[in-house]
Image (cartoon, coloured by chain):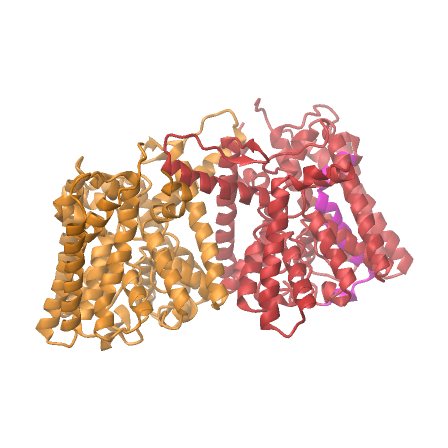
Chain colours: A red, B orange
Amino acid sequence: MKRGNINFNIIFRVLGSLLFIEAFFLMLALLVSLIYGEDDKIAFLITIGIASSIGLISRLITSNKKKEIGKREGYIIVSFVWVVFSFVGSLPFILSGYIPNLTNAFFETMSGFTTTGSSILNDIEALPHGLLFWRSIIQWMGGMGIIVLSLAILPILGIGGMQLFSAEVPGPVPDKLHPRVTETAKRLWLIYVVFTIAETTLLLFGGMDLFDAVNHSFTTMATGGYSTKQASIAHWDSAYIQYVIILFMFIAGTNFTLAYFGFKLKFKKIIHNEEFRYYLGFILLISIVSAIVLYNTSNLGIEKSFRDSLFQVVSLITTTGYATADYLKWFPFIITILFISMFFGGSAGSTGGGIKFMRIVLLMKNSVAEFKRLIHPHAIIPVRFNHSTVKPQIITNILAFIVLYVSIFVGGTIVMSAIGLDLQSSMGAVITSLGNVGPGLGEQGPAGNFYNVPAIGKWFLSFLMLVGRLELFTVLILFSPSFWKK
Amino acid sequence: MKRGNINFNIIFRVLGSLLFIEAFFLMLALLVSLIYGEDDKIAFLITIGIASSIGLISRLITSNKKKEIGKREGYIIVSFVWVVFSFVGSLPFILSGYIPNLTNAFFETMSGFTTTGSSILNDIEALPHGLLFWRSIIQWMGGMGIIVLSLAILPILGIGGMQLFSAEVPGPVPDKLHPRVTETAKRLWLIYVVFTIAETTLLLFGGMDLFDAVNHSFTTMATGGYSTKQASIAHWDSAYIQYVIILFMFIAGTNFTLAYFGFKLKFKKIIHNEEFRYYLGFILLISIVSAIVLYNTSNLGIEKSFRDSLFQVVSLITTTGYATADYLKWFPFIITILFISMFFGGSAGSTGGGIKFMRIVLLMKNSVAEFKRLIHPHAIIPVRFNHSTVKPQIITNILAFIVLYVSIFVGGTIVMSAIGLDLQSSMGAVITSLGNVGPGLGEQGPAGNFYNVPAIGKWFLSFLMLVGRLELFTVLILFSPSFWKK
């Protein structure tokens, strides 16, 4: 790799240009605000003005030459676009006065973009429709990825787009739907839009009104978890609605490449995909165990025990974070397995956060292989996945990822308890942020929120959300001194 | 490796012969019992009879031919010797009626041999001196290792001794004090005995009586943590005694090879040892942080805050498990860092349990290297330790170890919470057992004990103690079907 100076010109130019995309989505929220005629429209107008102005200025003061986006520029752009979008995206909350505090507004917005779904709101339903819609739409943008979206709709990223794509969608083993990265991005977004429309339709059938149906489809497909209701999905005491949402959370947690096969009716490819089988099997196993324990330790009926278990398990494993019950009041064993589920995340190539099933499965397979290597020291024992041998470099990279993930979890827990949270709440807050899940443990659990976390803690958790969303390396590499050396 | 049938003849013969060593140590406890003239002497006599009889029978019914101890026989002997010793070692507790229940007696004994130090006793001081001494001596035997002890004093293990040695002392990078394994074992035990005598002498100077001084020296040097007093080391409100014990816990947690250098006055080798520097630095860092927080959140003085912090930190990091305070009542932040310290363990080649500093340091260095590899994909970036390059196989093995360690921690937490413990107590019980530490969290904390854990949980935790003491692979490999295949 040729290493010259970092090209800040292109970084500013791209970051600025991307703000036009945010401005476009802000206009959709403004439209909702105008339809309902509520008091948040001025806030949206001002924010749109600010976003467009920054975008324009960045294009005027930067030069159009030297368009190459290198590896390092890619990491910088991808990390910063999420930060810039979150700052700008927090303005409607601040300017409307509904979340006047910058820390809280930034936390809420970063939590949205990263599809974490942790909230500082004590009364969600007090927000006007425009702001509620904005909360959902930032999750939807973040779900499939801001860069992936930009690649799909903006021609300007054509050169160096692959750098950006792989920095935002690192994944252990990259899947490409098309040799051209812009085509891949378009297909991913198309699948995403189709599913979102499908869910909206099914929710409307179930009697949900259009506004709630659209919002929940946005935040389900993003595995985000923001709801328009304080009681989250428990607000709708309808088995139909809850099963529809379970189904789409499940879909959102699968690799979108598989959905592409599904559209092409290649179902065999889905069924034979190893990650999918582990993902499905694990969800069923955990849900059934949880349902049995819940049924025997509560006064709920069989169907309700099963549905509540399945809902929370799918919600936490896919890192969506909706709730239909305050599961922290369930039998301790269920809390333990749900807590552990928060580490898993969805499949690679899904909108889910967490470690991802593929990494965990490869890790387990490597551990088994390590035992065999101990017994047969001279044999070559490869790790196999989807019927092919996994390269040792990928295993090493996954091991490094997991070690780093656990180290950040441990270090983060230390930081949060230094801020004053107890051990269990600290662990919950850190894993829910790093894994982009949403609810934590204790006061930050499904029945509570993050309002009382000290400001420094909110900034730290926001940082963890970003680190987790971009799968660690993309953000953390910026803290390596050798990254900035010529 | 030639793989025939597993040679069960040699396994039975060796296991039986080793019981004579246990019988010898039982005689020491009997001697103490006779000196104090208490009611536990018959229990020791019967146990000595049983141990010797099994030893004799095993020599009579097995043949003296085919003496070769292969790799697999080595793993089986080492794993089972700890189980057999624990069953036999629990007999004095059962037969004397002081711990009539087999589950409790086995838990107490396995906890002793593995130097965990978790107890089921509600009133330690109710035990007669012989049993108290037996509790300490099983820790002392287990500390340096039953096999290492046997190699040092029994000629019969000469052939295949290396197999046994490396199965009991796996360590990431083996240190040998002498090319012959029996000589290495003798030197290790000599150092161990010298330190034990030194500590006893210093404790006597501090006014501790001979019985307590010997017992505590045994359990300090073993990083075991059994005390003869219900209040553990808090019983002696003497700064001198507590600092002496801190010093020897610290020594017991260092690599014994360094002590060997110390005896040869090669102090530079100690100071330049990287693991030692991290070990010392980490202890100081954590202790000082804890002391500052403790000083500011309690009404203790500066010296007492420092001493209490240093004591618990050294006790938990070296996996000894003594206590001079109920630290679970301290500020939550301290509980978090103490809990995390329980994962560390001492240095490789020490009597401490846990993951070991060398593994953690190499892991961190590899993570840093992984970042550099990401920035410079074509450069070869090795991991260096003690001024030499670490082979990739060692890194892979350590990664597999850590992954397995964390998986067992997670799996164990699930099991314990299925048994009915809450999340925090489950985590505490599992890490304290797996890391051979002693106290857990919650009811199993430093002020409590394991009496109320259900029987199935006690057996499971005993199993984890053994798995942790033999550094995972030696025990777990026996569960691999391919281990038993011809």
Q: Position of residue B149 (x, y in %)?
A: 18, 50
Compared with A274, B465 (above or below) is: below
Q: Residue furthest left?
A: B35
Q: Position of residue B24 (x, y in %)?
A: 13, 59
Q: Is residue A141 magenta?
A: yes
Q: Quadrant of the N terminus of chain A?
A: top right
Compared with B225, B363 (above or below) is: above
Give the residue drawn at x 17%, y 40%: B65
Q: Quadrant of residue B445?
A: bottom left
Give the residue drawn at x 78%, y 61%: A240
Q: Relative to residue A379, is residue A412 drawn left or right?
A: right
Is residue B314 in sight in this rendering?
Answer: yes
Magenta span covers which residues? A123-152
Give the residue drawn at x 61%, y 50%: A281
Query: Looking at the magenta stretch, what is its main secondary structure?
Result: helix
Q: Residue furthest front?
A: B61
